Amino acid sequence: MNRKGRILILTGDGKGKTTSALGMAVRCAGWNKRVCILQFFKSSEYECGERLLFNKIGIEILPLGIGFSWQKTEKEQREALINALNISLKKLEENYDMIILDEILNVFSQKNIIVNDIVDEELIMNKIKEQSENKDIILTGRGCKEGFYNIADTVTEMKNIKHAYDRGIEACKCIEY
């Protein structure tokens, strides 16, 4: 195989998928490479540590979500996903060394809205395969579909053993955001 890039998947119900991807972004930027992170569900309405740092050090990070989706209408959710997918398809063609599609896998495992009519899974997979010829592409999220496993070079599944949320401990700065 003569590719310069790789496709990595971080999936599962455990904590650490995005955190692991962000660590790879830092490593890549440390080598003076161009990185773009597209966050499918996180909203610019909420401050988070990675955006504060990445904006300072030149890692492009775009929150494309609408925040707490369960508080939004299906129409709002669908429009946000269409926007995120369109931006991602354009960014995949740009000259980056690494692109992180944070929580993209969640798009295809949505239970509260039907996305089959707005998302062409095959188109997304083909674009990712094509663009991995010259860049690393990292996909995160729960509920990874088999088609994505098949195109990946590396797949890591995070398994939840114990989580603070289960005991009523809320998300906190520095750990979750």
Image (spheres, rainbow, N blue to C red):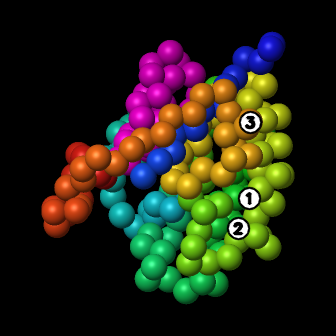
Mark 2 nearby-residue class (10 Å; few <14, some 14–19, many ≥20): some
Closest to the observer, 55 or 46? 46
> Pointers 1 and 3 in contact (CB under 8 A)?
no
Is residue 45 visible from the viewing direction of this image?
yes
Q: What secondary structure is found at the residue carrying circle 3? A: helix
* Quadrant hosting residue 109: bottom right
Disc assigned to residue 151:
3
Identify the residue at image location x=29%, y=51%. 176
Q: State how far apart marks 2 and 1 are (Cα).
A: 6 Å
What segment carries the magenta color?
Answer: 14-37
Determine the residue positioned at 23% across, 61% down: 165
Mark 2 touches mark 1? (CB < 8 Å): yes
Q: Which residue is found at the position 47% from the left and 48% from the top?
A: 12
Q: Which-is-in-front pick, marks 3 and 2?
A: 3
| Kind of residue indicated by mark 3 | Ile
The x and y percentages for residue 157 are 48, 39
Residue under label 1 = 86
Q: CA separation, marks 1 and 3?
A: 21 Å
The label on residue 128 is none
Residue at 44% across / 82% down in the picture? 71
| Residue at which label 2 appears | 82
Compared to residue 151, the image places residue 79 above or below, namely below
Q: Which quadrant does the N terminus fall into? A: top right
